[in-house]
Image (cartoon, rainbow, N blue to C red):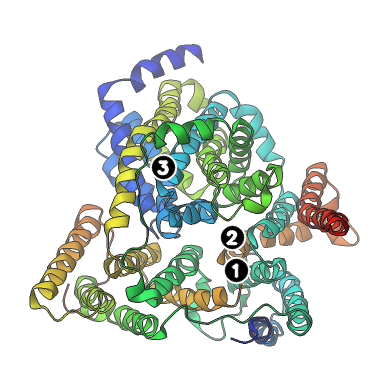
Amino acid sequence: MRNPDRIAAAVMLAVAAVFWTQAGSIVGFLGGIFPRLALWPLTVLSGVLLVKSWVRPDPPTAFFEAAPTPALVLVGTVVAWISLLEVLGFASSTVLAYAFLAWYLGGRPRDPKRVALTLTIVVGEVALVYWIFNDLLLVPLPEGVLI
Amino acid sequence: MLEHLAIAVTGVFSARALLLIVAGVASGLVVGALPGLTATMAVAVLVPFTFTLDATSGLILLGAVYMGAIYGGAFAAILVNAPGTPSSIGTTFDGYPMARQGRGEEAIIGATVASVIGGLVGVLALLFLSPPLAALSLRFGPPEYFWIGVFGLTIVASLASGSLLKGLIGAVLGLLISTVGIAPVGGEVRFTFGQPILQGGVELIAALIGLFCIPEVLMLASRGDRQAHMLTYEHRPGILWETTRKVLAMPGNLARSSILGTVIGILPGAGGNVANLVAYNEAKRASRHPERFGTGVLEGVVATEAANNAVVGGGIIPLLTLGVPGAPPDAIIYGALLMQGLRPGAELFTTSGDITYTFILSLGLAALTMLPVGLVMGRGLHRAVTKVPTSFLAPTILFLTIIGSYAIRNNVLDVAMMFGFGVVGYALKRLGFHPAPIVLGLILGPIAEQGLVQSMLMGVRYDPRWLILFDRPISWLLIGMSLLSLGWPLASAWKARSRRKEAAPHA
């Protein structure tokens, strides 16, 4: 990112604009006073940041520390994980996602022994935590067609 | 009182009580150390276990769990930059940098000793100063709560770490996000964008977990094969005594932070989450080297941990004297008190004095028990985290954050919100926004808004109504503290610039 300040200011001004459009629909005085008290400084300070981005910008910085692919794969996996929580159930969706991430972030090993070991550790860990929360502490976890 | 205390001393040193304290502290520590599982949750899930116990034993167990869970939050904060509880947010500022520098053991030992001392100070206040501190808490009304919110926001200057402007923007963004949902007075629906799921507002814990934990996990994943382990560990012989001596050589920091934690803890609704940040800010102001805060200094960890464990004792003062819980875990303990047929108030210290004083002394013992339990478990946990490869650590943190955010309201949407905040938090971090000011805004928003709106309602006889905010002595004290807190970093920066200008001609 060549000018992170300018991007930051643009993002914050966009956020402020979106909230301002909604603020108009707040009819009551008491309900609207605090949001407006917060919106004005956000708008003004974001404007100041925009000016700063021209006058004294922060140095350029990368959006990803290194290769973006692992982070993007992780995001995609977690989105799928959360989507499947109430479809498959907590334990099943967690084993799938956890095992995939451990394999992917571990360098995508092809050795069957390593893959089997990873899977065993994942299944064991998830089973233990599932038992502790669901059966011992009685904290309900998402349920689906499987466990 | 002395008669009750004598009975309490014999009761608390019984084998059963000691076992419950050790078990409570250990289990509280484990739950508090898991990112996303809060002290409130730790106390709540263990309440059913107290049904089979007598009143005294049940309260001893809950108190020990509470004390252990608040302390346990430090481990996640130090080892994975993911505060286990909101009251450990401040511990991440210096605790995690210390761990990244290979000084995680020093951070854990420092956090442990500070937590013990803070916990003891809170309990001493509970034992001897309950009546005057309870009376003080009654003098805080809506205008004072509004100014507490404002004072809390001035801490942004300390938390901004780099850019004060971006820190202020982050804090105001947090304030704005806290208004999503239903207005506290009037019930108006705000900023839901037509989505019914947002009517419940943004859950603080989900946002906290997302903003702190997920960016760390994404950065771990980004570093990929370049970093097989998240942290390094090198045991230094004698580090335990060396660090303990260093902590005890900070009596000013310990005393100030513990007292701040106790006093802020007595304010219902304001205490727990804010005390550690206020203590951090004050420790930074009082330090001879404030510029080092945030880079991995033990003083920062000591301040936050002493304060947040002092809150335990402080928060129980209004609970036992007035029946007003100081913090969410106190509300759970209140429920347990009622279930055992005990009603808060003067009667608790007279008719039920044996039970009450045993409970109070057990909190003190729980604070002391944190030392052996925490040092053994904490250092073991540190070693374990350094040995676990990143490929397992990252999914494990995700796994725990999902459980933590789901367990808040048994709602998958909280999990989705948590992760959404996480991705946004990562992007904001890369743009130079630290998550702490945003979370501070989220915490203080409801406090400040409720204070402001209720003040407007109370200020009917004033013209204009907002004059009520300036009409009370405690309000003026808080205004003064806010101005001092805001002006100090600006004055320090101006002084430093003047010194540099003076030195320049000689260079």
Amino acid on which disc 2 is placed: Ile
Q: Chain of mark 3?
A: B
Q: Which mark is residue B458?
A: none
Q: Which mark is residue B66?
A: 3
Residue at 67 percent across and 53 percent down: it is B291
Kindly give the residue lying farthest to the left in the view shown: A113
Residue A145, given in percent of the width and then of the height, sits at: 17, 79
The mark tally for this picture is: 3
Labels 1 & 3 near each other (Cβ < 8 A): no
Q: Report which residue position mark 2 lands on.
A: B443
For residue B178, the mark is 1
State how far apart marks 1 and 2 are (Cα). 8 Å
For label 3, the SS is: helix
User: Label 1 is found on which chain of the structure?
Assistant: B
Which amino acid type corresponds to the residue marked 3 in the rendered image? Tyr
- In space, the residues marked 2 and 3 are separated at their CA atoms by 20 Å
Say whether residue B226 is visible.
yes
Q: Reading the chain from its start, which is encountered first: label 1 or label 2?
A: 1
* B60 sits to left or right of B471: left
